[in-house]
Amino acid sequence: MTLLDFPHYSARMEAELKTLEDKLTQFVEVNQRLRDDTQRLRQELASALHRNKQLEEKIQTASNRLEELVQQIPAEEI
């Protein structure tokens, strides 16, 4: 490399660094969006699991009540 090529080398290197910086910025932005999405999905999952547990408890309560009602029906009516 000669001294005359050094400015071109510097310009090429500067362009490559800028490209790398842009890619890194994009990576950080995508990474942050993915983190946000993951956090939101975890919250949604926790909410869905809680709601599912509530519904299971309601089903169990209804099942128990139905079983009690069936037990109260006289045998000849069944």
Image (tube, grey):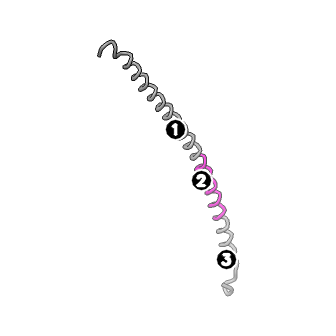
Say if mark 3 contacts mark 2, CB within 8 Å. no
48 is within the stretch colored magenta: yes
| Numbered label attached to residue 13 | none
Name the residue furthest bottom.
76
| Numbered label attached to residue 49 | 2
Residue at image point 54% right, 43% down: 38
Residue type, numbered disc 2: Leu
Rendered image quadrant of residue 55: bottom right
Which mark is first along the chain, 3 or 1? 1
Q: Choose mark 1 or mark 3, whichever is in front.
A: 1
Which mark is first along the chain, 1 or 2? 1
Which mark is first along the chain, 2 or 3? 2
| Residue 28 screen position, x and y as percent | 51, 33
Rendered image quadrant of residue 2: top left
| Residue 50 screen position, x and y as percent | 62, 52
Chain part drawn in magenta: 43-59
Q: In the figure, is residue 46 to the left or right of 74?
A: left
Q: Is residue 4 above or below residue 71?
A: above
